C-alpha cells in the first residue's frame, strides 16, 4: 500500500501493541483540560478573544480519520474556552462541527449534541454545558480505547494539547502576564510525556508527520528550565476528609527569546495542522 494513502485504524495487523489505559490516563491527567486552561485565563481577568479559537471553516480540511480525530481535539479545546466564558451564541457552531468530526470516526453517538444544543440555545446553566461537554469527550475517549483504537484517542489528546498551547501562548504574548508565561514553560513536561505515545504509532505516515512537527516544538523546550523545591506538607480538611497537601514550589525559567521562539513555532504548526 502506498504511504500516501490514509491507513485505516481498523487494519490491526500493522498496528503496534496497544498502549495500556493506565499510561494514557496518566498522560491525560497531566494535560490541563480546556476548562482548566480557560479558567486560569479568566481568573486573571483576561477577557474573551474570539480570534484565539480556530474557525470552524477549517474542519472542511479534515478528510481522514487521523485528521478528523486531530480536529476533534482542537475544536474540543476551543469549546472549553467558549463554555468558560459563556459564549453560548458561538457554542452551537462548534458543537455542530465536533459532532460532524465525531460522526466521521464513528463515535458521534457518544457526543450529546441535542442536550448541548438545547443548553446553548436557551442560554441555560453554563456549568451543565461544561459538564456535558466534558462527559461527551470522555465517552468518546473511552470507546476508542476499548475498541483497540487508542491511536485515534492519542491523536485527539494531541489536538487538545496543541490548541491549548496556542491559546496559552497567544494570551501570554498579548497580556505579558507572568502566570501565562509560566503556563507556556510548564508544557515542557507535557510534551516530554506526549512524544513517546505518538512515537508508538510512528509507522502511520500521518503520525510521523505530526511527530516531526511536534519535535520542532520540543527542541525549543530544551532551553526551558524547570526546578522544584520540596516544601513542608500540610494536613487540610476537604469535604470532611483529612488530606495531605503538597507545598512544593516549582520555578519556571524561560527567557524572552525562548518564549518568542516557542510562540512562533506553535503558531506555525497549529496553522499547518488546520490547513490539513
Image (cartoon, rainbow, N blue to C red):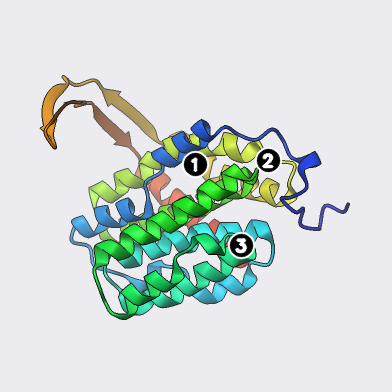
Which residue occupies 50% across, 31% down? 22
Question: Quick one: 52 or 80, which is closer to the camera?
Answer: 80
Are circles 1 and 2 on residues that touch, CB within 8 Å? no
Are circles 2 and 3 on residues that touch, CB within 8 Å? no
Question: Quick one: 99 or 202, which is closer to the camera?
Answer: 99
Measured Cα–Cα span from mark 3 to mark 1? 28 Å
Disc assigned to residue 201: 2
Question: Quick one: 218 or 208, which is closer to the camera?
Answer: 208
Mark 1 lies on residue: 220
* For discs 1 and 2, the disc positioned in front in the rendered view: 2
Q: Earlier in the sequence, mark 1 or mark 2?
A: 2
Percent of width and height locating residue 264: 47, 56
Q: Earlier in the sequence, mark 2 or mark 3?
A: 3
Measured Cα–Cα span from mark 1 to mark 2? 23 Å
Q: Earlier in the sequence, mark 3 or mark 1?
A: 3
Q: Indicate whether 47 appears above or below 158.
A: below
Measured Cα–Cα span from mark 2 to mark 3? 17 Å
Can residue 176 be seen by looking at this rendering? Answer: no
- Element type where label 2 sits in the image: loop
Percent of width and height locating residue 99: 52, 69
Q: Quadrant of the C terminus?
A: bottom right
- Residue 220 lies left or right of residue 168; in this view the side is right
- Element type where label 1 sits in the image: helix
Percent of width and height locating residue 140: 52, 54
Which residue occupies 37% across, 77% down? 90
Which residue occupies 42% across, 44% down? 258
Percent of width and height locating residue 102: 56, 63
Amino acid at each position: 500500500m502506498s504511504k500516501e494513502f490514509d491507513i485505516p485504524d481498523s487494519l490491526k495487523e500493522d498496528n503496534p501493541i496497544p498502549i495500556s489505559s493506565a499510561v494514557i490516563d496518566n498522560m491525560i491527567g497531566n494535560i490541563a483540560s480546556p476548562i482548566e486552561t480557560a479558567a486560569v485565563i479568566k481568573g486573571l481577568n483576561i477577557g474573551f478573544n474570539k480570534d484565539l479559537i480556530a474557525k470552524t471553516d477549517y474542519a472542511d480540511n479534515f478528510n481522514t480519520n487521523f485528521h478528523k480525530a486531530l480536529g476533534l481535539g482542537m475544536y474540543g479545546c476551543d469549546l472549553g474556552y467558549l463554555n468558560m466564558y459563556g459564549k453560548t451564541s458561538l457554542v452551537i457552531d462548534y458543537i455542530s462541527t465536533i459532532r460532524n468530526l465525531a460522526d466521521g470516526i464513528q463515535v458521534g453517538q457518544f457526543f450529546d449534541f441535542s442536550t448541548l444544543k438545547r443548553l446553548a440555545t436557551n442560554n441555560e446553566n453554563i456549568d451543565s454545558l461544561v459538564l456535558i461537554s466534558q462527559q461527551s469527550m470522555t465517552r468518546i475517549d473511552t470507546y476508542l480505547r476499548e475498541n483497540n483504537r487508542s491511536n485515534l484517542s492519542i491523536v485527539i489528546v494531541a489536538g487538545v494539547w496543541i490548541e491549548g498551547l496556542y491559546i496559552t501562548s497567544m494570551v501570554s504574548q498579548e497580556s505579558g502576564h507572568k502566570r501565562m508565561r509560566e503556563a507556556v514553560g510548564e508544557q515542557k513536561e507535557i510534551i516530554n510525556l506526549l512524544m513517546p505515545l505518538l512515537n508508538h504509532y510512528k509507522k502511520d505516515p500521518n503520525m510521523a508527520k505530526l511527530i516531526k512537527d511536534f519535535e520542532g516544538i520540543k527542541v525549543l523546550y530544551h532551553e526551558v528550565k524547570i526546578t522544584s523545591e520540596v516544601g513542608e506538607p500540610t494536613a487540610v480538611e476537604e469535604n470532611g476528609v483529612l488530606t495531605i497537601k503538597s507545598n512544593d514550589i516549582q520555578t519556571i525559567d524561560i527567557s524572552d527569546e525562548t518564549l518568542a521562539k516557542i510562540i512562533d513555532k506553535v503558531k506555525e504548526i497549529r496553522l499547518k495542522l488546520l490547513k490539513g
